[in-house]
Every structure is written in C-alpha cells, then in structure tokens.
Image (cartoon, rainbow, N blue to C red):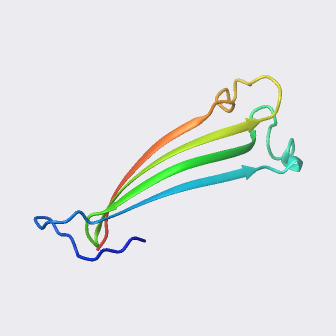
Amino acid sequence: MASRRKTTSIGLTGHGAHSRSRRISEKKVDTRAFPRFADPAASARAAKSYGLSGNWYLSCAIRISLDLVQTRFDRTSGPQTASNPLIGQDEQALLTRFQVGF
C-alpha cells in the first residue's frame, strides 16, 4: 500500500498518493479434467492474463482505482460449439472502483 507524507483532504492542496502495478497470471487445467469434468469442445485448457493497474489514494479513506486486463484463452483443437462460441476469443476488461473506508 502507498503511504503519504501529508494527509490530503478536500479543499486542501496536495494530490494524495499514486501507485501503479503490472500483473501476469496463468491458469492451466489438468488434462485429466477432460472429458470427465469439462467438455473439451466448449472449455479452455489454459488462460493467460496481463494486467495494468493504477490507484489514487486521495486521502486515508478515499481510493480510486483503474484496472485494464487482457486474457488469452487456449482451447482444444476442433470446431467451436454453439454452447460456447466465444471461448476462442481474447477477453479485455476495464474495471474501475471508487472506495470509501471508515
């Protein structure tokens, strides 16, 4: 967590604290899960995510964050099924959060 030299309050000068981060994650499903627990034609075998995050701590109680995440899915070979036609496509997400803590 970021720390501030001075507490910033509404109406006072200062910009609070900022933090930035990068994130990489990967998920692989054991091959023994197919076909017993998951349909290989409609499920991804692996996913890899890359993310960027930024936080602004306006005061001790107020935080604003922005996250951008891209996930790539690796699916089994074969045609896409009607039950899950999007599994072969990448996913992008933009997440925002405004947090007030007491």
- The residue sitting at the left extreme is 11
Q: Residue 90: image x %, image y %? A: 62, 34
Q: In this image, 48 relative to 40: left or right?
A: left
Quadrant assignment, res 86? top right
Residue at 53%, 38% (x, y): give it.
92
Q: Residue 30: image x %, image y %? A: 84, 51
Q: Nearer the viewer, residue 32 or 48?
A: 48
Q: Residue 43: image x %, image y %? A: 74, 38
Residue at 31%, 70% (x, y): give it.
101
Classify 82 as above or below 62. above
Which quadrant, please, contains the N terminus?
bottom left
Residue at 79%, 49% (x, y): give it.
29
Quadrant assignment, res 76? top right
Q: In this image, 71 relative to 26: left or right?
A: left
Classify 9 as above or below 21. below
Which quadrant, please, contains the C terminus?
bottom left
Q: Residue 42: image x %, image y %? A: 75, 33
Classify 99 as above or below 93. below
Q: In this image, 65 relative to 76: left or right?
A: left
Q: In this image, 74 relative to 69: left or right?
A: right
